[in-house]
Image (cartoon, rainbow, N blue to C red):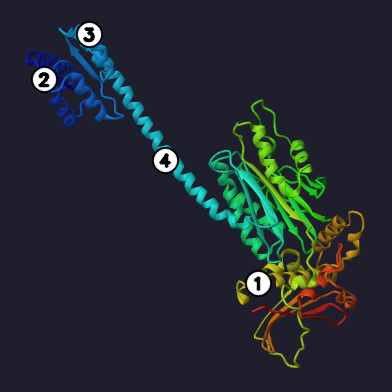
Amino acid sequence: MKILVVDDTEAVLLLISRFVEALGHVAIVARDGAEAVDTWRRERPDLVLMDMMMPVLSGPEAAIAIKQEAGESWVPVVFVTGIGEENRLAEAIERGGDDYINKPVNFRVLEAKLKAFDRTLELNRKVREQSAKLADYYDRAEEEKRVVRHLMEQMVNAERLYDPQLEYWLTPAESLSGDLIAAARTPGQALYVLLADGIGHGLTAALNVLPLTQPFYSMTEKGYAISDILTEMNNKVRQVLPVGRFVCVVLIAIDEANGCVDVWNGGMPAVQLIGADGGTQHSWKSSHLPLGIVPTAAMDVIPERYYLEGSCTVVAYSDGLTEARNPLGEAFGVQRLFDLIARTAPGARMGEVQQVLAEHLDGEPHHDDISLIMAHCGLPQPTAREMARGPAVEPLRLPSQLEPEWRYSMQLGASELRHINTVPFMMSFINKVLGQHESQSDVFLILTELFVNALDHGVLGLDSAIKREPDGIEQYLVERARRLSELRHGFVEIDLAGLRVEGEYYLHIVVKDSGTGFDASSWLDTDLAKAGGLSGRGIALVRSLCATVFYRGPGNEVHAYYRVRE
C-alpha cells in the first residue's frame, strides 16, 4: 500500500514511516493537516495514518477534507493519537476517521491493523471493479434495449394501428414487449391484424417477433392472402431464429366488402367473435402449431372463415392477460374477461378491461406481456355509389379504334394457377404504372373478383350454390383446394391496357378462362346494394366500380373499363 503518515512530531513521523516501509509499504509524509490534504491530492495514497492534534489543520478537519474529495472511493483514515478523552476520539471517527491507534504506538497492533485494512482495501477494489463491470453491462444492456425498441417502433409501424376499425392494448412486463401487434390494409381495404407472442418476455422475446413484421406489412400492402403471409413468416422464423425458438401467432383478415372474417390461430388463446349483445357468435381455437416448429411444407396455412351477421367484434389476446395474478395468486381468467365484455357497451369494453385488471392486480406487477385486440366488423355495407367514391360513372362510349398507351398480358397455365397468387403480382405492375394512387383499392377489388371468378367457376368448375348449404363454406374451400391440387389443364389469360378516351384515363382489364362460360346478363343487372349473401356479390361489385363491364363469347371472357381518378 501507499501510506500517508502525518504527524507534527518529527521523531514520531520518522518512526512510523520507517516501520511502514519495513513492512513493505510505501510511506509518504506530511507534517500538518493542510500539508496532508495537499499531499493526498498529489499522491492519492491508499491509507492515511494521521495525528489528531496538529497545527494549521487538525487531523479530523484534514480527514473530512480528504473524505469529501475522495467521493465514492474509500480512503481509510487511522488516527494515531495520545488523546485520552474518549468523546473527542469518537467524534473524530464519526467525522471521517475509520479507526485509531494510541500513542505510544504498539507496533504489533499497528501491523495487525495495516494487514486488516490491506485485506479490506483489496476486497473494496474487487467490489469496485465488479460494480464498474455491472455498470458497464447495464449501460450496454440499456443501449441494446434502446436500439431494439427503436427498431420495433420503426418495424411495427404504430401509425397503422390507428385504424378506426381497431382498438388495441399492449403493455410489456419489462421495458420491451415479447408480444407484437401489427395492422395494415390490403389494396382492397381488407383489414389484416397480427398478434404474436414470442417465448418469454423482454429483449429475447422481442427479438423473436421482429422477423414477422417485414413480411406482414410488405405482403399485406400487395394484397397477398394470409395463407401466403403465413408461409413467408414461417420461412423467416425458421431462417432467422435459433433452433427451439418459435412464435405463437394469430392472423386475422376482416373483409368488409365480402362480409367475412378469416382467422388462423397457431398456439394463441381462442379468438372470439362477440356480437353486439356481448354474446359469443363464433370461436377460433388454436388448431395449428406456432410458427417456426415445422417446415412450411408440413404446415396447414388455410385459415378458418366465418361470414358476418350484423355488427360484431373480433377479440384476440395473449395469455399474459388471462394469467395475470393478484397478490393472492388468483388468475384474471378467461371467464372474467368475457363476462366483463358481455356486460359492457361495445365502445367502453377496452377501457373497462384495463380498469378491472388494474383492480385485480391491486398494485402487483404482471409477470408476462399483456396484449388485447378488439377489431370491429360487420359494419353497414357501402352502397354501389359509395364504393365508387366519386361522382356516378357515366357509361363509357368506346370509339371504334382505340390504341392503348401501354399493354401488359399474361397467360397462366395449370401449373402456375396451382402455385402463384397472381393478383399481387399484377398489382405490383399497376402500382408502378399508376404510382401511389387512390384508385389502387378499386383496381385490386376488380382484379381479385374477376380472377377468382375465372379460376373458381371457369377453370375449376365450382358452383357457388355449395356455399348456401350447411357448412357450405368449408365444403367449398375444401373442394376448391382439391380441384386446384389436381388441376392439369386449363388457363386464365389476363390483359391490362391503359387507354385515353375523350380526355379521361381508363384501365382496360380483360380476363379470359378456359371454361365453358355462363350467362352473365342477370348478374350484370344486379344492384350491389341488393347483392349479398355467400355468392353473387363479386360481379355486382365490379359493375359498380367500372364504367363498362361486358362479357364476350359464351361468357368466359370479361372486359372491364375502369376510369382512373387523376
Q: Earlier in the sequence, mark 1 or mark 2?
A: 2
Q: Nearer the viewer, mark 1 or mark 3?
A: 1
C-alpha span from label 1 to label 2: 89 Å
Q: Position of residue 13 (x, y in %)?
A: 11, 16
Foreground residue among 380 and 100? 380
C-alpha span from label 3 to label 4: 44 Å
Residue beneath disc 2: 55
Q: Nearer the viewer, mark 4 or mark 2?
A: 2
In the rendered image, the vertical position of residue 551 relative to residue 115, given as above or below: below
Image quadrant in which the N terminus is located: top left
> What type is the residue that disc 1 sits on?
Glu
**Which numbered circle lies on residue 438?**
1
Q: Earlier in the sequence, mark 1 or mark 4?
A: 4
Residue beneath disc 3: 109
Q: Position of residue 256 (x, y in %)?
A: 77, 61
**Which numbered circle lies on residue 139?**
4
Question: Does residue 531 appear in the picture of this structure?
Answer: yes
Q: Find numbered disc 3 in the image and state the secondary structure of the residue it sits on.
A: helix
Q: Earlier in the sequence, mark 4 or mark 2?
A: 2
> What type is the residue that disc 2 sits on?
Pro
Q: Find numbered disc 4 in the image and state the secondary structure of the residue it sits on.
A: helix
Foreground residue among 361 and 24? 361
Neighbor class of circle 2 (other Cα within 10 Å; few <14, some 14-19, many 20+) is: few
C-beta proximity under 8 Å, tags 2 and 3: no
> What type is the residue that disc 3 sits on?
Val
